[in-house]
Image (cartoon, helix red, strand yellow):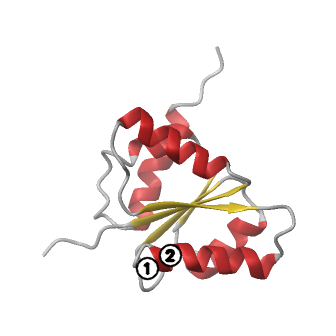
């Protein structure tokens, strides 16, 4: 039997994550299954952000945090801290989201678990940063 498919929740300030996800899917010409975005507004307090994250995971049909990878825009932000708290600092949160990470989701092994998938996405994202 194969390992469960890792769900991915993109959590960003404003619509950045949703817009990047839409752009990645348009570029790839395919939907990215089991991936959703959560937007955090400036007026959202911690409980609202927490509820949005919980709802996103529930909407994906995932029952528990062990098969969820969170991609977050800013290290140390409220969304990053809340996501880290949900998965007990087990390497299921990647901060510094960029577009190459989302594109890599189309070909990455999503059965390897959140920590391994996160490492793959970090390698891709890091290799894609250049100064020219």
Residue occupying the point 45% across, 85% down: 64
Disc 1 secondary structure class: loop
The residue to which callout 1 is attached is 66
Classify residue 35 by image quadrant. bottom left
User: Which residue lies at the image location 60% right of the left edge and 45% below the top edge?
Assistant: 19
- Residue tagged 2: 57
- The quadrant holding residue 81 is bottom right
Looking at the image, is 48 positioned above or below residue 5?
Answer: below
Looking at the image, the residue that sits furthest to the bottom is: 63
Q: Does the rendering let one see residue 124?
A: no
Which image quadrant: the C terminus?
top right
Marks 2 and 1 sit apart, C-alpha to C-alpha, by 11 Å
Q: Which mark is residue 8?
A: none
Number of disc labels? 2
Residue found at the very far left of the displayed protein = 1
- Is residue 80 among what the camera can see? yes
x, y (%) of residue 82? 69, 75
* Residue count near mark 1 (Cα–Cα under 10 Å), binned few <14, some 14–19, many ≥20: some
| Percent x, y of residue 48 | 75, 78
């Amino acid at each position: 039997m194969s390992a469960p498919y890792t769900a991915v929740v993109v959590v960003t300030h404003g619509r950045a994550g949703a817009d990047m996800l839409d752009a990645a899917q348009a570029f790839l010409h395919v939907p990215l299954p089991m991936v959703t975005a959560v937007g955090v507004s400036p007026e959202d307090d911690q409980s609202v952000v927490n509820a949005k994250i919980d709802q996103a995971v529930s909407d994906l049909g995932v029952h528990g945090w062990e098969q969820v990878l969170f991609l977050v825009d800013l290290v140390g932000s409220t969304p990053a801290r809340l996501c880290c708290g949900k998965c007990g600092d087990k390497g299921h949160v990647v901060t510094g989201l960029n577009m190459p990470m989302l594109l890599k989701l189309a070909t990455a092994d999503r059965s390897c678990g959140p920590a391994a998938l996160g490492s793959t996405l970090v390698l891709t994202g890091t290799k894609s940063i250049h100064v020219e």
